[in-house]
Amino acid sequence: MEPRHSNRTTAERDIDSVLHPYTNLIRHKEVGPLVITHGQGVRVFDEAGKDYIEGLAGLWCTSLGWGEERLVQAASAQMRKLPFYHLFSHKTHDPAVALCDRLLGMAPVPMSKVFLAGSGSEANDTAIKLIHYRANALGKPAKKKIIAREKAYHGVTVATAALTGLPFNHRGFDLPFSGVLRAGCPHHYRFAQPGESEEAFSTRLAAELDALIVAEGPDTVAAFFAEPVMGAGGVIVPPAGYFPKIQAVLDKYDVLLVVDEVICGFGRTGRMFGTETFGIRPDMMTLAKGLSSGYAPISALMVNERVYGPVAEESGRIGVFGHGYTYGGHPVSAAVAVETLNIYAERDILAHIAKVGPVLQDGLAAFRDHPLVGEKRGIGLIGALELVADKAAKTPFDPKLAAGPLVVAKAQNHGVILRAMGDSVAFSPPLVISEAEIAELLRRFGKALDEAH
Ligand code: PLP
């Protein structure tokens, strides 16, 4: 039988065979797939050889850019030596141990143990399961509700999608996962009251959180999940004083804090972890993306003794900690992650971000006067521009116009790949980007913005 793909282009075969994530499946054929063939530095190339500056580092992950030969070497050497082994039933291997060891050494607050998984969703899903397991271990089976925020993004498994606070992750899906409470989104520009300062807004959000916990009953509330900077929700940088005020409320009611560092971890906000940038004290931290610079799928969940102690005891009582993924701590992914962390340290990635971060932020701020731009947000090497129909009134565009996706589509024509989060356009380039490359990225984007006006 003829192979199905004889004489047909990658794009044609894609349309016939691939079910695409985060895509309007009905429109896929009409829009047509963009086939990326290779990458180098901060650029990727399509089949025609056209170059695109990757303004979002793929999916906020390819921190070292494309073509990093040391990661290729780390993967191939590990592939040859031990392509697969697992961590189930007391087994282990050096790449996983080296990585867990390294992460504990880097942890911004004391952490006890590291659990390895394959994706950000899996790491957060594991955190949810540990919250339940711990509550049972402590003899408090009612203390299991989890608070997540409007516009949060914590993944797409059944449980993590329920924590995610974005309507399109819920619409059309039945999510049979209960016990999720919703706290307010800390977006000052959109949700502060007229004249309310950032500090006052933070104080109000903390008071609302306090009231929520009291209304539900503190004996029923187990944990609060938060991204330091909310990514998929539109790059929301917390207002002044936010995390210390929230943390004080959580401490008052013995509620665990899970910090989702999947985007912010490894330099994105200017410090190694968003936890440090914003003065947070997590009980659990989830990491992915920049952990391996996106070169291999891997994630990590770090837990402190407050979590690990009861969980370990419960596993002793039950006889096993009955959770784990076949590919959790995959040796090739772990070896790539360790080498990624080596490169961050050797090249002093934080010093580089301190130098080029302000170039990105100033460059984005220069668009503030543009008639379409309502707000510029950002810190370190992550940022966003929120597009509005009316600057003075902050009026959003009619959603039917899809202003964000429109500008992003135009930007793609001009050779820069970005992502729209509603009407906010997000920027999160590879951390290795140079000043000249930032200037070029913004120049290409500026043409698209002008065209959209
Ligand atoms: N948490 C955050 C903050 C994310 O941005 C993402 C993905 O973008 C996830 C979790 C889920 O990670 P994954 O797509 O690897 O499951």
Image (spheres, helix red, strand yellow):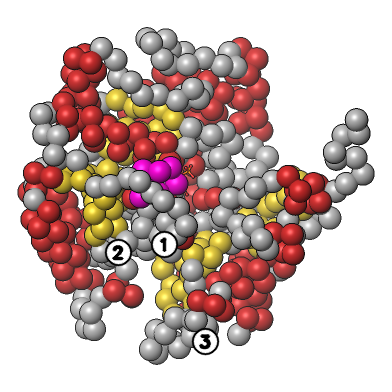
Q: Amino acid at mark 2?
A: Cys
N-term-proximal mark, 3 vs 1: 1
Q: Position of residue 266 (x, y in %)?
A: 43, 43
Label 1 SS: helix
Residue position marked by numbered label 2 in the rendering: 185
Residue under the image location 55 percent in, 40 percent down = 294
Q: Which residues are magenta?
A: 156-162
Is 327 drawn above or below residue 22 in the view shown?
Answer: above
Residue in the foreground of this view, choosing between 136 and 391: 136
Q: Is residue 265 above or below residue 132?
A: below
Numbered mark located on residue 167 in the image: 1
Q: Are marks 3 and 2 in contact (CB under 8 Å)?
A: no
Dot 1, how many residues are within 10 Å of its Cα: few (below 14), some (14-19), or many (20+)?
Answer: few
Predominant SS along the magenta part: helix
Which residue is pictured at 56% across the width and 16% down the height? 84
Q: Residue at x 18, y 55 (%)?
A: 246
Alpha-carbon span between mark 1 and mark 2: 14 Å
